[in-house]
Structure formats: structure tokens, C-alpha cells
């Protein structure tokens, strides 16, 4: 189960909103059907030991709970927590791996390498400079939008690629692949001080390339906040 949302902590009292998804587990098909990816409110507590406990509102007479210990540094890996679901949609109990994300605001830089090791230009990776900001989350849906520009600098050219990508909590919603020869930027991760970018259909001439062409390139980079 995956809950992606935005939480607010007021002196140990936590509330928020997000979406819940059940995936990768065929035994939970009925849960996935019964609990669609629609906004769900949660409430709970964060105690002095930084133990987080959340309970969802009732959806189709079903409630889920989340428990996890939250480190002071949210960029650290969070210990495994637990998740349960009970009600008419079905019953489930298991582990969870919470992930927290900070708002994206500022300038991030790093190298951009071909996503495939066999691709051309492997020995001469480019660089990426991302300048971006994130809107405040919508109080009803929990969704925010990351906007900005990724400047790709390759061997003999550079190009500014616009970004407008929604996300809920730590979950970045990928931009769908299009058939037009326009480079597409996805943010595979935007947590802490590092953002992982994935640039698709950008040729070594800094121009967009249609699918199934020899000059088509995919790039991946890990950019660090400056």
C-alpha cells in the first residue's frame, strides 16, 4: 500500500490529505478497486519520540492506519513502518517504507549521463542546472506543482527545457511520453537536497528527437541543491 500526501503537525497533532494506492499485490485487487486514487483525509499524532501514527477517514466503510518512526533529518532513510487496513473493502496488515520530501525551491546542479551505458557520448557526460519552485499543496487534494527550467549543457550545445510536473507528497507524477519530437523532463525523485532527473528524446544536438531514431537519447542526472 502507498499513501502519498501532505501532513501538517501542530504541537503533536497531525492532519493531512492524500491518495492511497494498492499495487503489486494481486491479493489486494479488491482493495484497489474499492479504494480508488481519490483524496483521503488522515489524522493522528507525532509524539516526543517522533513516532507517527495516522488513521484515515472511513472510505466505503474501510479505514487504514500507518505507523512509523520519523528521523529528525528527513533526507535519511526512514525505518520500516507498518500499515493496516480493515473494513468492507478488505483486511490487510504489513510493512511500509515511508518517504518524506521537502518542497522544491532553488537551484540544483549536477551531471547528466546517457541512461543507457551503450549510448553515444558516455565518456563525455553533460551537465544539468535546474531552477525550480513548488506551489503550496492544494488543501483539498494535497497536490502541488513543480515548475521551472532544466538547462542541459552537452558537448557543443545547450538547451533550456521547461518543467511543469505535479506531485502529491513525495510522489512525483511522471509526464507521459508524447509522439512529438519534443524533449520531456521527468523528476524521478525530489526528496531532501537531491533531485533525480530523467530527460527523454533529447539528441546530442540539443534538439528533440522522435521515437526510434538513431540520434534519440535519454539522459539521467542526480542534481544537488546549491
Image (cartoon, rainbow, N blue to C red):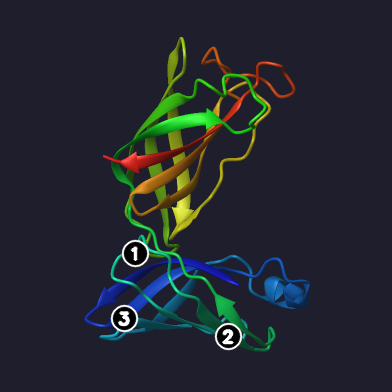
Report the side of 25 relative to 201 (left or right). Answer: right
Report the side of 133 relative to 174 (left or right). Answer: left
Up/down of 6 relative to 220, above or below: below
Q: Find disc 1 in the rendering and name its residue.
A: 74
Say what secondary structure mark 3 lies in.
Answer: loop
Count residues near mark 3 (Cα–Cα under 10 Å), then give few for <14, some for 14-19, many for 20+. Answer: some
* Residue 209 picture location, percent across and down: 63, 19
Q: Depth check: 75 or 55 in front?
A: 75
Q: Find disc 2 in the rendering and name its residue.
A: 84
Say which residue appears at 51% left-offset and 16% top-offset.
206
- In the picture as drawn, the residue positioned furthest to the left comes out as 11
Instruction: Specify the quadrant of the image occupied by residue 44.
Output: bottom left
Say what secondary structure mark 2 lies in.
Answer: strand
Q: Quadrant of the C terminus?
A: top left
Mark whose residue sits in front, 1 or 2: 1
- In the picture as drawn, the residue positioned furthest to the top comes out as 156
- In the picture as drawn, the residue positioned furthest to the front comes out as 123
- How far, Cα to Cα, is label 1 from label 2? 23 Å
Observer able to see residue 200: no
Residue 50: assigned label: 3
Count residues near mark 2 (Cα–Cα under 10 Å), then give few for <14, some for 14-19, many for 20+. Answer: some
Report the side of 37 relative to 105 (left or right). Answer: right
Up/down of 199 relative to 39, above or below: above
Observer able to see residue 142: yes
Q: Quadrant of the N terminus?
A: bottom right
- How far, Cα to Cα, is label 3 from label 1? 12 Å
Say what secondary structure mark 1 lies in.
Answer: loop
Amino acid at each position: 500500500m502507498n499513501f502519498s500526501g501532505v501532513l501538517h503537525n501542530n504541537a503533536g497533532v497531525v492532519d493531512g490529505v492524500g491518495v492511497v494506492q494498492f499495487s503489486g499485490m494481486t491479493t489486494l485487487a479488491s482493495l484497489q478497486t474499492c479504494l480508488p486514487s481519490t483524496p483521503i483525509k488522515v489524522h493522528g499524532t507525532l509524539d516526543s519520540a517522533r513516532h507517527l501514527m495516522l488513521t484515515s477517514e472511513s472510505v466505503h466503510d474501510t479505514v487504514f492506519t500507518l505507523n512509523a518512526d520519523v528521523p529528525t533529518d528527513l533526507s535519511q532513510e526512514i525505518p520500516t513502518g507498518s500499515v493496516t487496513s480493515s473494513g468492507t473493502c478488505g483486511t490487510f496488515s504489513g510493512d511500509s517504507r515511508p518517504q518524506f520530501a521537502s518542497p522544491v525551491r532553488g537551484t540544483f546542479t549536477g551531471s547528466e549521463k546517457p541512461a543507457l551505458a551503450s549510448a553515444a557520448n558516455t565518456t563525455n557526460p553533460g551537465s544539468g542546472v535546474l531552477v525550480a519552485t513548488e506551489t503550496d499543496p492544494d488543501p483539498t487534494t494535497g497536490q502541488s506543482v513543480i515548475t521551472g527550467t532544466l538547462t542541459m549543457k552537452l558537448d557543443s550545445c545547450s538547451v533550456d527545457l521547461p518543467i511543469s510536473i505535479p506531485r502529491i507528497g513525495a510522489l512525483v507524477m511522471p509526464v507521459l511520453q508524447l509522439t512529438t519530437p519534443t524533449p520531456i523532463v521527468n523528476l524521478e525523485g525530489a526528496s531532501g537536497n537531491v533531485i533525480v532527473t530523467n530527460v527523454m528524446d533529447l539528441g546530442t544536438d540539443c534538439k528533440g528527437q522522435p521515437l526510434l531514431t538513431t540520434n534519440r537519447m535519454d539522459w539521467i542526472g542526480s542534481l544537488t541543491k546549491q
